[in-house]
Amino acid sequence: MFEKMIVLSDEIHAFIKSKYDEGFNYLLDITAIDYSDYITQQEKDFALVYILRHESFKNYIVIKTYLHELEIETISDIFKGANWLEREVYDQYGISFKNHPNLRRVLNHKEFVGHPLRKSYPITKGQILHETDDLIDEMNHRLLSKGLVCKTDNGLFSECSKDLMFLNLGPSHPASHGTIRTYVALDGETVEAAVSEIGYLHRGFEKSCENHTYNQIIPYTDRLNYCSAISNNIAFVKTVEEMLGVTLSERAQAIRVMLLELSRIEDHVVCLAAVLVDMGGLTNYWYMYNPREDIYDLLSKLTGARLTNSYMRVGGMANDLYEGFEEDLKAVIKKIQHGVEQTLALIKHNRIFHDRTQNVGVISAEDALNYAITGPNLRATGVAFDMRKDTPYYGYENYEFDVVVGSVGDVYDRVMVRFAEIDESIKIIKQVMENLPEGDVNVKDASVTLPDKEAVYGTIEGAMNQFKLIYEGVKVPVGEHYSALEATNGELGFFIVSDGSGTPYKVKVKAPSFTAMSAYPEIIEGSQLADAILTLGSLNIIAGEMDR
């Protein structure tokens, strides 16, 4: 359930604070809309949208405010997660947030000129940037918040009161898990302060969506969290289908549930293999990576692609399961279970593993919620939020499975929650395959799904239907809608604005890795340098999803 409301811009801080006090204490996302090219004139050219979830996790609210001027009060004093979300809006749209602690770009480089998600910014415009961001200004703000430097009368920063060593972790290093850079101030081996730089993989996903039809966007969603591509496909088409008012057949819903859980396993084994390698355990890596290869082989046979499957379509999927799929799936599940058993046998009672992971990289439940951390990283803190249980979809309420939670919120809990979630996903997959309904996998609606090839090649109506859907795209009714599902890293959502055409007016991704990464510098402060590497691995940051 959700509710939409419009609030005056000069009342937004007080209104959101009142909603926070009412229990809407989980900030899902902040984004802006540039209405300057919209089909109907709006109250103002720019609006901000805040999406807040209630502490019961059952419902959420969408708050919109039209901007009379491109400046508004920050809410980063209410939600820690708002810090990076507001920086993103500033970066992409040029909207300023008064009293923000350090308003600067976050996805685009500091030399970038303009704001790319404004309608006036040409999609074909490129910029060549030369200078590296030294992050010293951001680090000084961090040291200032810790009382280690002072601001002088002329606005500069004083010398640090401690003899610290400054070091870059990444962006080009295996331990930074992709292109992520963290600039740390070290007191011996202890991380005194840290700031992170992202945006190295920023591909302009959201801008590209404004120039492609809804089905053409699906391959781009594969590249968000490429470790579990199909779950991104499903999250996107689910949002579009809800705007269309389309209900899938029971068979299509069941297949999507099965593939979502297989994607969860696929993603978790990659994360677990990588984090154990960070610890020096290479043998575990092969026990976990071999079943991942088996999953890839299965998906390749089903979809025609190993990594970026592009299997979903608005209104269904590319094709039904092939003959013999169930037998292949059973064989893959046995290999997954064998890999998990072998890995746990190596680490479950291993003192080195326990010493390196317990009480390391701790985040409390309160801070995790305030940063809007989601998925297994949130559940590891003891918060049992799982959209499959709290706001079920595709019939998840009919399957028996447990929500796995930790108690401390450390590296150990994040690792063991993922191991246990693999078992729960296997339980769900088995129930789906035992009760898989018969029927079509695509809705029978000529305005949504492509006709059979026989009709395309044999009838003028079929040929015209194919041409219209490919050329113009699926026409989505005018409106604004947010929808999400429990992806492998947590709540993966899409906020879409439609102008009634076959191309979205705006698409915004609520990416779980983005909010988790925003919390990372604070999590590692006070810890040992070597533990910072393990902490990053256990958060399972996927740069493609975070940077978009």
Image (cartoon, grey):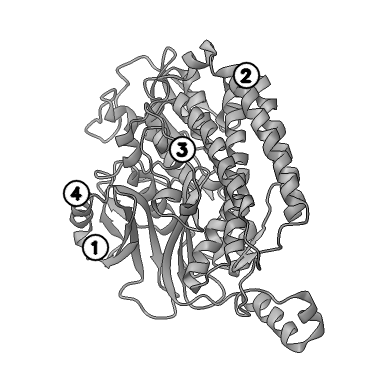
Inter-mark Cα distance, 3 to 4 = 26 Å
- 2 or 4: tag closer to the N-terminus: 4
**Coordinates of residue 22 in the picture (x, y in percent):** 20, 51
Outermost residue to the bottom: 460
Could you say whether the residue bearing mark 3 is in a helix, strand or loop? Answer: helix
Mark sitting on residue 21: 4
Q: Classify 10 Å Cα crowding around label 2: few (below 14), some (14-19), many (20 and above).
A: some
- 3 or 4: tag closer to the N-terminus: 4
Type of amino acid at the residue the image marks with label 4: Asp
Image quadrant where residue 372 sits: top left
Residues marked 1 and 2 touching at CB (< 8 Å): no
Q: Classify 10 Å Cα crowding around label 4: few (below 14), some (14-19), many (20 and above).
A: few
Type of amino acid at the residue the image marks with label 2: Gly
* Left or right, residue 275 beside residue 242: right
Mark sitting on residue 281: 2
Residues marked 3 and 2 touching at CB (< 8 Å): no
Question: In the rendered image, which residue does mark 1 sit on?
Answer: 9
* Left or right, residue 351 beside residue 75: right
Could you say whether the residue bearing mark 4 is in a helix, strand or loop? Answer: helix
Could you say whether the residue bearing mark 1 is in a helix, strand or loop? Answer: helix
Q: Return the residue nearer the eye: 373 or 333.
A: 333
Q: Classify 10 Å Cα crowding around label 1: few (below 14), some (14-19), many (20 and above).
A: some
Mark sitting on residue 376: 3
Inter-mark Cα distance, 3 to 2 = 22 Å
